[in-house]
Image (tube, rainbow, N blue to C red):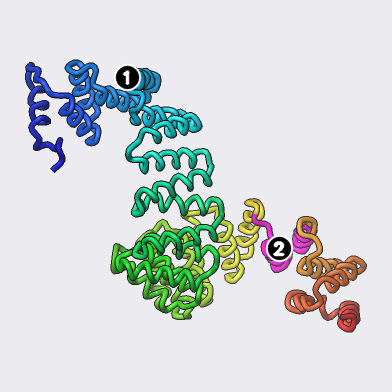
Amino acid sequence: MDLYSENNKPLQKFESMLKTNNVYFFDSLEFEGIIQYYIDSGKSALAKKALTLGLSQHPMAVSLKLLDAEILIFDNKYTAAIEILDSIQAMEPTNEEVYIQKATVYSKTNDHKEALIQLKIALDFSDDKSDVYALIGMEYLFLNNFSDARENFIACLEEDLEDYSSLYNVVYCFDMEKKHREAVEFLITYIDKDPYSEVAWHQLGRQHFVLDEFDQALRAFDYAVLVDELFVGAYIEKAKTLEKLARYSEAIENYKTTLELEDATSFALLRIGECYLELKDYENALQFYKRTVHEDPLLDKGWMALSSIYYQQKDYEKSLYYINKALDIDEINTAYLRRFGEINIKLSFYEEAVKVFELCIELGDDDLDIRTALVDVHYFLGDFELALDCLKDADTEIPNTAELNYRLACLHFLFKTEEKGVYYLKKGLGIDYEYHKIMKEMYPSVFDLHVVQDIVSFYKFSF
């Protein structure tokens, strides 16, 4: 039982005193416990009352002065806190807590370099150096000095090998420095000391995964779940690795294990659906996609997955319904807008497709596929001049592409500007001869022209 739990006599005595006009005496240790209890319970008003009475009975008690400074820091009264800490330092210059609290003040006011100075002084006087190393590591993180932060978190592990918070921080520093190979070496050394650390095996697997070393990653995750068969995070990472290895059935089993160990997550349900899709098991894929959006109706990726599977099955009406659900959540996601445009083309809603492709370009998603799609839709609508204008803009933004040059050639032949048509046709053939088949598919009347056939035949024997 906690020394200052609600069943403790000093605490009961203090609260009884508050209900009367009596003033009872407590020793400084009792006051310290009562105040700390209220701080930990979030009862700041009672903590302050106890502190005021405690300081009146024990004005020289350093432990109470430190609590006074702690409460002032919590209330953002940094100047007053520093004054108290300076007075304690004058009395007890080797009290590590003084320097730690000063460091807290400097850290909160973004003076992390001064905070480090105070913490390094505290380190000299500390009997439990691990906590101070951790605080120093955090200050270095605030300064984005990942190398020094890492070294201090490693020092924590040297004091306590099972300090997993510090272990995670060490790996985080390696990640931020993109030193994944060094992280692997560190974790292997750590595992040599503690081979039954599921956390270390899990982190080792993550590093191998980032390095695309999927077989080694899988081995590490296998050890993690062998040590702790309830380690949900390791099953998730193992399943992701199995996906990379195209072992989709095994990935599904591992994702399903996580559903047995804890409440279903939309992430796991979506990934199971994706794995079934890879196995071309569309019925189960649909089932898990639907479970995904049932679990989290605001997960736009779930609605997009449903739209995609129906698009593959050429059920464009349902695909349109689900892509609209995704766009209701994220209306400027250009991947969703593209799919919306593609579906509208399949449904012959060309005007809608034009609007959405123009919006994609406006949003900065203006690669070659979008540009050519917009040109082709204008062509299907018979807006040849608009198609030509779009092509000219696209050719300016993305020059020297066969896709654009063949289309420019065809439209110039349609507009009877044969000289330009010949120019762009030859340019397209010079970039990618094989792609000239797009002319036969989309512009058959142009492809059948004698001049076009002659030029294509000439270039055929030039390669």
Q: Position of residue 357 (x, y in %)?
A: 64, 59
Q: Say the numbered circle drawn on residue 60.
A: none
Image quadrant in which the C terminus is located:
bottom right
Magenta stretch, residue numbers: 365-392
SS for dot 1: helix
The dot on residue 368 is 2
Is residue 369 highlighted in magenta?
yes
- Residue 91 - label: 1
138 shown above or below 355? above
Mark 2 or mark 1: which is in front? 1
Name the foreground residue: 16 vs 394.
16
Considering the whole magenta stretch, tell me its main secondary structure.
helix
Which image quadrant for residue 388?
A: bottom right
**Disc 2 to disc 1, how far (Cα)?**
74 Å
Q: Which residue is painted at 35% across and 27% down in the image?
A: 94
The residue lying at 36 percent from left, 43 percent from top is 130
Local crowd at mark 2 within 10 Å, few (<14), some, or many (≥20)? some
| Residue 227 within the magenta-colored segment of the rendering | no
In the image, what residue occupies the spot 9% across and 37% down?
Answer: 7
In the picture provided, is 33 more to the left or to the right than 116?
left
Let me know if residue 93 appears in the view: yes
> Three-letter amino acid code at disc 1?
Met
SS for dot 2: helix
| Mark positioned earlier in the residue sequence (2 or 1) | 1
Residue at position x 73%, y 67% in the image: 379
The amino acid type of the residue labelled 2 equals Leu
Task: Find residue 221 and report its horizontal and vertical position in percent.
Answer: 41, 68
